Amino acid sequence: MKKSILAALLGTCFATSAFAQTSVQIYGIADAGVMWQKGGPTKIFSGGADGSRIGFKGTEDLGNGYKAIFNLEARVELDTGTQQPTLMNDNPGVYLLKGMDAIPVAIRSRLQSLIQPPGGPAVNQERALFDRTAMVGVITPVGAILLGRMYTPGYEVFNKADTFESGTAGTWGHVTGGTAGFTALGADIRSQEAIQYRIALPNGVGASLMYGPKGSGYLGRYNKFRAGAVTYSANGFDVGIGYNHGYDQQNRPSLRTTTVGGSYAINDSWKLFAGFHSQRNQNSALLADYINGWDTGVTPALVQQGLPATTQAFLRNVFVTNITNNTKQDANSWQVGGHYKVGNGRIMASYAHQNDRLVSNSDADLYAIGYNHFLSKRTDLYTVAAIIKNSNDAQYSPGTSGNPGGFTKRPGEDGRALQIGVRHRF
């Protein structure tokens, strides 16, 4: 019983190759390709099907059913050699400035560049060395205790349900960003400053609980973070239900997500996927950053122009009122799809719908089809075509595993992309 639990826990703590006892392993993924997109440049990208990375992990048998483990995983952008991917295009996302017509055009242009710096980092703004994972823990006969920066329980369930496995232009996450586009995360992928308890039973049932104090969350903006999941992986099923809930700097409820779904392997040829994702956020943890951007990037310019204090206060109030509303989220999303094995490859297809429940009603539909051809157990080629049908203010645009898509040229315009890439695991 104890050995079975330990083996299962090791499998849940590390997502890649198995390793021997008392060992340290270097592993990674090198993934790159070319993407053609409507309304954006043709780009060579890194991390199409999987984020390119290099990692170190290890375990030591402490005896009596205890093991010490660690995992350090760094992001690697093969196209630039850096650790900070950018959006796939530089089209401005206009939703965050919605309702600010009272602010002069020149100031709104300045705000746009502050909120979305052209060519600026879309991920890993902190320039963290081990942005993907930085964790140490102990596996015991009754579960594992882990400390550090880790994937959240809710996102692990989201990944189980995603037909395109959180990669390529087809991944479900391309239509679950902030309202109308990638203005914020639609799910907390990781949390730093976190402690997690995990257990995996021999019958396939697993569970996890995560807590983060002040400084937790993906960007460290939460005052606290709570999450949990229950999963089942056996008899062809890989399913679960996960819940994430962050609290902003004033300890008000921030992004809250509930995710249900997973996959079912019918036989060696067919594998079906389905998922439901609810996201709510009335108090964005990024709001303080945006207001600070006004105070440090706009106010000095207004002072230099000699505008009266009353005018400055009026313009700031217009900005704060509208940016507060524009950072709110209230949406339900669902996705269905499947894999079909053909020779040394597999065909993948999915449909996802984002139902925006705010007044803007910025819905989006994602249609995707792709093909993987496996040259070996470690190396495969892939191609994916995706179309996003945007409604009203929506500007969702297809991206990759490592790069958010960014925005279409205009609200309501379709986003389209074709990708070809190669992935090698080592």
Image (spheres, rainbow, N blue to C red):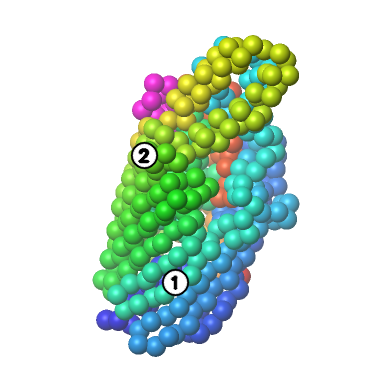
Q: Secondary structure at mark 2?
A: strand
Numbered mark located on residue 137 in the image: 1
Image location (x, y in percent) of residue 21: 48, 84
- Does 235 sit left or right of 420 as displayed? left
Question: Based on the displayed image, in which of its 4 quarters is residue 363 positioned?
Answer: top left
Q: Secondary structure at mark 1?
A: strand
* Amino acid at circle 1: Gly
Q: Which residue is mark 2?
A: 253
Q: Residue at x 61, y 31 (%)?
A: 293
Q: Is residue 172 visible?
A: no
* Amino acid at circle 2: Pro
- Does 161 sit left or right of 39 as displayed? left
The magenta-colored residue range is: 355-367
Mark 2 and mark 1 lie on one chain; the one further toward the N terminus is 1
Image location (x, y in percent) of residue 223: 43, 46
The quarter of the rendered structure image containing the C terminus is: bottom right
